Amino acid sequence: MQRYVDEADITVRSGDGGSGAVSFRREKYIPRGGPDGGDGGDGGDVIIRVNRNLRTLYGLKLKRIFRAQNGRSGSGQNKTGARGRDCIIPMPPGTVVIDMETGKVLFDLTGQEGERTLLRGGRGGYGNAHFATSTNQTPRFARSGGPGREMQLTLHMKTIADVGLVGLPNAGKSTLLSVLTDAHPRIGDYPFTTLYPNLGVMNYRNEREIVIADIPGLIEGAHEGHGLGVRFLKHIERTKALLFLIDLSGKDYLSQYHTLKGELESYSTALLKKPFIIVGSKADAASDQERVEFLHMTGEAKRAVVSSFTGSGLQRLKDEIVVLMEQRDER
């Protein structure tokens, strides 16, 4: 199984241009013909291609070095050398491409299909046919091809999903994701079972598909790097909406909720501007009174109570998620 990798450092290099040729026309009855050295071919470019089938930077981290082909040298009879093959690097949507030397963000691949040229190849050099003049009709020199360019890149991937599931460790996010979508995340009854973001697609009445991301559990101080830290907070940034999961078996509902809000706000105040639903999970482990208490704990957002074990409340939650997404789409 492919590991989820959301960071990678790679080296890229475009191709050198081919050298121009020094050649003279030599045919029967034309023993001293003029120059006919062809130009060198251009070096290949380095191109980034968004591939929506990729969900990880694992393949890029393994290879690490990506080179385009050099252009071929020119030859006699004014033949231009072949252009070098481009190096096309597939990257998943959500990848941020950063120049390692300057720290500048070069591309932010937000999901649109298409290609971006990262480095141009070196230009092919001129053959001696280019340098013939009235005063020098037999130039015995040509121009070398231009060098390619090399760059070190840092890649960061931010998960692209419609809805992000956030909650404290062991709040039931992975289990909820598995029953709402077709995902099969690793599930266990202990903190930090989820070490990498999991994605699933919720099919709503065969009319709409919504991508949901299970973000690894947050703890107090996550924005400072505690626990799994900011490494996973970044995956929430591009979601359109959030589900705050509150473990109803934990009783301290408000404390859980304020911890989650506080960590998101400390990382980026923009996160709290996203529409959200407060979801009470593990409802089968709570009494009727405790469920009512949860539903009335705060009036600032929609609330839902679900049990991933019994299935109660799941359809209503799906309905609420769709309504939330439709309201956001109308903005």
Image: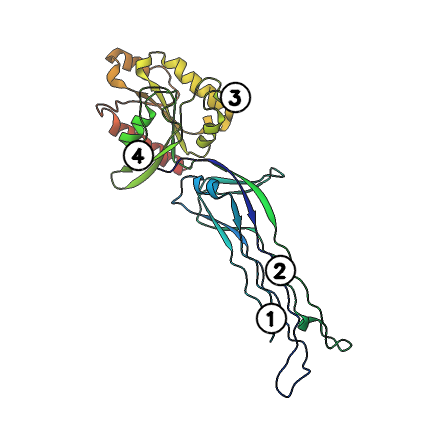
What is the secondary structure assignment of the residue under circle 4? loop
Instruction: For the N terminus, give its image quadrant.
Output: top left
Task: Identify residue for label 4.
Answer: 183
Pointer 1: what residue? 75
Residue type, mark 1 in image: Ser
Q: CA distance from mark 2 to mark 3?
A: 48 Å
Write down the residue under mark 2: 123
Q: Nearer the viewer, mark 4 or mark 2?
A: 2
What amino acid is at disc 2?
Answer: Arg
Q: Nearer the viewer, mark 2 or mark 3?
A: 2
Q: Secondary structure at mark 2?
A: loop
- Determine contact: label 2, label 3, CB under 8 Å: no
- Crowdedness near tag 4: few (<14), some (14–19) or many (≥20) residues, C-alpha within 10 Å: many
Crowdedness near tag 3: few (<14), some (14–19) or many (≥20) residues, C-alpha within 10 Å: few
Q: Earlier in the sequence, mark 2 or mark 1?
A: 1
- Mark 3 falls on what kind of element? helix
Looking at the rendered structure, which numbered label has been put on residue 156?
none
Find the distance from the CA under tag 1 to the CA under tag 3: 61 Å
Q: What's the CA distance linking mark 1 and mark 4?
A: 57 Å
Task: State how the image is colored.
Answer: rainbow
Question: Mark 4 or mark 3, which is nearer the start of the sequence?
Answer: 4
In the picture, the quarter occupied by the C terminus is top left
Residue closer to the observer: 135 or 302: 135
Residue at numbered disc 3? 224
